[in-house]
Amino acid sequence: MAKTIFEEMGGTYTQVGDYLLPDLKLPEEEQQPIGVWGQRHRRYLKEHRRATYATLLTSGRLNSYLADIDRQAEEMFLRLVKQMAEAEGVTEQLKADNQMEWVGRMNNIRSRAMEMVNNDLIYARNPAACISTSVETIDPPKVFWKYYDLYRRKRISLSEYAAATGLSAFAIRHFLKNVVEKSPKAIEKPKQI
C-alpha cells in the first residue's frame, strides 16, 4: 500500500479497534501560572473570539499569551490604583484618621481601575494593540500619528482617538507618555504616512 502524505511527512497512525487514527498532538508549551485577569481574557476569547482562541491554542502560544495579558493587566491595575489614590488624596494619614472613609474611597478607586483594565485590556476588541508597559522603546504604529495632531489640538477626545485608530486607550496613553513626551521632535514633526 502506498504511503499517505501524512506518513511521508513523518506522521504515524495508531490502531484503535478497526480504525487507524493519526497521532496528532499540540506543540509543547511551557506552562506558566495564569491569574484572574488571564482567566477572564481566556473566557472572553473562548466565547467571543473563537478563531483567535483556536489559533493560539493550536500554535502552542495560548498559555504564554494569557500569562502576558495577566501580567500587563495586574501592572496596569496597580498603577491606576496608586495614581488615582494620590490624585484624590487618599493617604495613610486618612487611613489612620478615618478608616471607614478610607475603605470606601479605596473600594471606589479599585472598582474604577478594574473597569478600566477590563475595558482597555481584558475585553478589548483587539488585545494585540494593547502593548506591555514594560517595553519603553516601542515606536507607535503609523495609525497613531495619523490622528495625533487632532488629539493634541483637542479636536478629538481620547475615546474618539482610540476608535479612529483601533488602538486601545491604554496603548494611546502609553505612547503619549513614553514616546511623545520623551522626544519633542515627534511633536514638531509627526511621521508621515
Image (cartoon, rainbow, N blue to C red):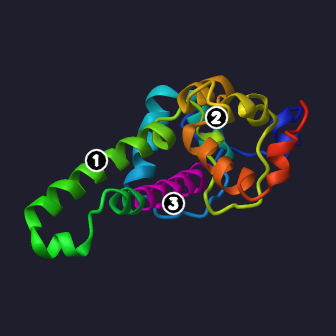
Secondary structure state at the residue bearing disc 3: helix
Cα gap from disc 3 to disc 2, whole angstroms: 19 Å
For this view, does 9 lie left or right of residue 123? Answer: right
Say whether disc 3 or disc 1 marks the residue closer to the N-terminus.
Answer: 3
Amino acid bearing label 1? Ser
Crowd around label 3: few <14 · some 14–19 · many ≥20 (10 Å): some
For this view, does 23 lie left or right of residue 45? Answer: right
> Which residue appears at 23% of the width and 58% of the height?
106
Residue position for label 2: 167
Q: Do tag 1 and tag 2 residues touch (Cβ < 8 Å)?
A: no
Cα gap from disc 1 to disc 2, whole angstroms: 23 Å
> Can residue 164 be seen here?
yes
Amino acid bearing label 2? Leu
Image mark for residue 111: 1
The residue mark sitting in front, 3 or 1, is 1
Residue 73 part of the magenta-drawn span = yes
For this view, does 17 lie left or right of residue 174? Answer: left
Q: Do tag 3 and tag 2 residues touch (Cβ < 8 Å)?
A: no
> Which residue appears at 45% of the width and 51% of the height?
38
> Can residue 60 be seen here?
no
Secondary structure state at the residue bearing disc 1: helix
Q: Position of residue 163 (x, y in %)?
A: 60, 24
Say whether disc 1 or disc 2 marks the residue closer to the N-terminus.
Answer: 1
